[in-house]
Image: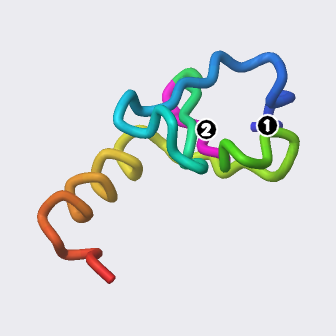
Amino acid sequence: MTAPSPSFLHWRKATASQGSQGCVELAPLPGMVAVRDSKDPNGPMLVFEHDVWRHMVEQVRSGELDL
């Protein structure tokens, strides 16, 4: 799949990040999730399949990926 232009996606940021210096933003794609740095909206984005993204979020929440 060729990644769409970031400007055509509907990006959203967590409400908890409002007022912060930056965070990641997410945009839904068919069967996937695009992720980018909110401080660099024209920079690179990563695209994950839904299952991969969901698994990573579960690992972060459980502390398994805690740095």
Residue 23 lies, in percent from the top left, at: 54, 48
N-terminal of the pair, mark 1 or mark 2, is 1
In the image, residue 35 lies in the stretch drawn in magenta:
yes
Residue 3: image tag: 1
The residue at 35%/36% (across/down) is 16
Q: Measured along the vertical axis of the image, is residue 50 above or below residue 59?
A: above
Q: Residue at x 51, y 45 (%)?
A: 20
Q: Residue furthest left?
A: 62
Please tell me which residue lies in front, 52 or 66.
66
Q: Is residue 62 magenta?
A: no
- 36 up-or-down from 56: above or below: above
Q: Is mark 2 on a helix, strand or loop?
A: strand
Range covered by the magenta-colored residues: 31-36
Give the labeled residue for mark 2. Answer: 34
Q: Position of residue 66 (x, y in %)?
A: 27, 77
Is 56 positioned to the left or the right of 39 in the image? left
Q: In this view, does 23 lie above or below 59?
A: above
Amino acid at circle 2: Ala
Dominant secondary-structure state across the stretch colored magenta: strand
The percent position of residue 31, horizontal first and vertical second, equals 49, 28
